């Protein structure tokens, strides 16, 4: 089932260690099939270099496993909760990328100090509260805290990103870490000045409506 999505997720998962967003077996990506509504997600505890397309697990929105011989990610319930509450979302990424997670450890959102941040996110990257792993609780925090952003930090935990597809969610995860790293470096020198909200809105509109091909 859903061979094209499995193949896509296999390649997208390789982007996580390549971009230093995960360590060992941490992190995961899922995708929702637009036609069936079924979810494809990484199996739990499998190292990235050992992943293969056939290892991914397919579930329905209620969490019933339709295909797959391995246990799905320990974050599956939270992914499903997000998909249930956000019908516009078709890809989800979870990482513990170091610079962004450093802000999460402090329970701090990331203000808009950089034009690249304004371009990609259109506002601060929010930080939600603390929740334990294993159930829907993390998904609830994501939905409650993320607002209009494609990314949210979870206090004492890490990063969740969402997108119109899995690739968009992975791009957001890469950009969160890039923004967090540059912001952290700037904070070592001094206190940056936030970009005014009206400029953030203009930058984000240009990036989403004019930039690129």
Image: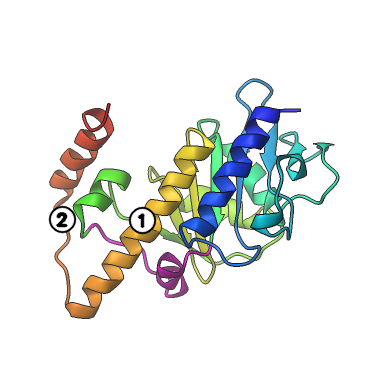
Q: Which residue is mark 2?
A: 195
- Can residue 92 be seen here? The reply is yes
Q: Residue at x 53, y 38 (%)?
A: 166
Q: Residue at x 52, y 47 (%)?
A: 143
Circle 2 Cα neighbour tier, 10 Å, few/some/many (<14 / 14–19 / ≥20) = some
Rendered position, 149 above or below 48? above
Q: Which residue is mark 1?
A: 125
Q: Alpha carbon of mark 1 to alpha carbon of mark 2: how far?
A: 14 Å
Q: Residue at x 14, y 65 (%)?
A: 193
Q: Quadrant of residue 7?
A: top right
Nearest the eye: 146 or 46: 46
Q: Is residue 73 magenta?
A: no
Circle 1 Cα neighbour tier, 10 Å, few/some/many (<14 / 14–19 / ≥20) = many
Rendered position, 180 above or below 14? below
Q: Earlier in the sequence, mark 1 or mark 2?
A: 1
Q: Residue at x 40, y 70 (%)?
A: 103
Where's residue 148, x and y in %?
A: 38, 42
Where's residue 16, x and y in %?
A: 52, 55
Where's residue 28, x and y in %?
A: 61, 52
Q: Is residue 102 magenta?
A: yes
Dot 2: element: loop
Read off the magenta span: 96-112
- Quadrant of the image for the N terminus? top right
Q: Residue furthest right?
A: 69
């Amino acid at each position: 089932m859903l061979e094209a999505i499995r193949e896509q997720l296999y390649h997208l998962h390789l982007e996580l260690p390549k971009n230093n967003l995960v360590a060992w077996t941490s992190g995961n990506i899922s995708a929702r099939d637009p036609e069936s509504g079924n979810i494809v997600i990484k199996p739990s505890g499998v190292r990235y270099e050992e992943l293969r397309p056939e290892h991914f697990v397919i579930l329905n929105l209620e969490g019933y496993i339709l295909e797959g011989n391995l246990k799905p990610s320990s974050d599956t319930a939270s992914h499903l909760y997000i998909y249930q509450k956000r019908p516009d979302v078709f890809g989800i990424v979870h990482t513990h990328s170091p610079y962004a997670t450093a802000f999460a450890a402090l329970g701090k959102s990331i203000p808009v100090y950089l034009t690249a941040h304004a371009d990609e996110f259109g506002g601060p990257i929010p930080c939600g509260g603390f929740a334990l792993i294993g159930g829907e609780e993390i998904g609830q925090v994501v939905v409650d805290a993320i607002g209009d952003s494609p990314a949210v930090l979870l206090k004492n935990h890490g990063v969740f990103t969402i997108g119109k597809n899995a690739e968009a969610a992975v791009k957001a995860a890469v950009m969160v870490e890039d923004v967090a790293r540059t912001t952290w470096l700037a904070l070592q020198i001094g206190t940056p000045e936030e970009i005014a909200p009206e400029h953030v809105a203009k930058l984000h509109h240009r990036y989403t409506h004019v930039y690129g091909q």
